[in-house]
Amino acid sequence: MVFLNLSWRQRAGCRGVDPDVFYPTSDEEAAAAKSICAQCPVLQPCLEYALANRERDGVWGGATERERRRMVRQRRKSA
């Protein structure tokens, strides 16, 4: 596991929100989480954390698991 500076979590827009919102059963149900992420001041550090740690479940940094897998593949291709 990669450890990054986690102080961004203290400023996250999702603090205090029911965690179930961020673990939808399908990508189609992720809209509520994504709308919270869209307003978040630490969207990018959250996304980078999820990518670096290969978070498999939930919406992180405004991206679903499927979207994050796509990002990882694209980064590998351009590296």
Image (cartoon, rainbow, N blue to C red):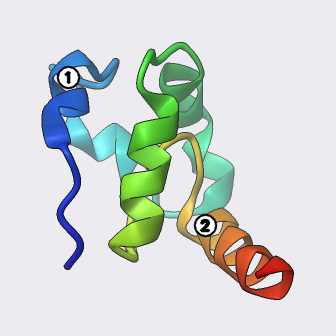
Q: Reply above or below: 9 against 55.
A: above
Residue 8 sits in quarter: top left
Residue 31 sits in quarter: top right
Question: What's the amino acid at mark 2?
Answer: Arg
Answer left or right for 10 relative to 62.
left
Q: Nearer the viewer, residue 65 or 74?
A: 74
Q: Reply above or below: 39 against 78.
A: above
Question: What's the amino acid at mark 1?
Answer: Arg
- Find disc 1 in the rendering and name its residue: 15
Q: Residue at x 17, y 42 (%)?
A: 6
Q: Which mark is residue 26?
A: none
Answer left or right for 6 relative to 57.
left
Residue 10 x, y percent position in the rendering: 15, 22
Q: Nearer the viewer, residue 13 or 79?
A: 79
Residue 43 x, y percent position in the rendering: 49, 31
Q: Residues within 10 Å of mark 1 (few under 14, many from 20)?
A: few
Q: Mark yes or no: residue 58 visible.
A: no
Furthest toward the front, the residue is 79
Callout 2 secondary element = helix
Residue 49 x, y percent position in the rendering: 36, 56
Q: Residue at x 54, y 68 (%)?
A: 65
Q: Mark yes or no: residue 23 visible.
A: yes
Q: Reply above or below: 15 against 65.
A: above
- Find disc 2 in the rendering and name its residue: 68
Q: Name the N-terminal-most of marks 2 and 1.
A: 1
Callout 1 secondary element = loop
Q: Reply above or below: 10 against 44.
A: above
Q: CA distance from mark 2 to mark 1?
A: 21 Å
Q: Nearer the viewer, residue 14 or 75?
A: 75
Q: Residue at x 19, y 44 (%)?
A: 5
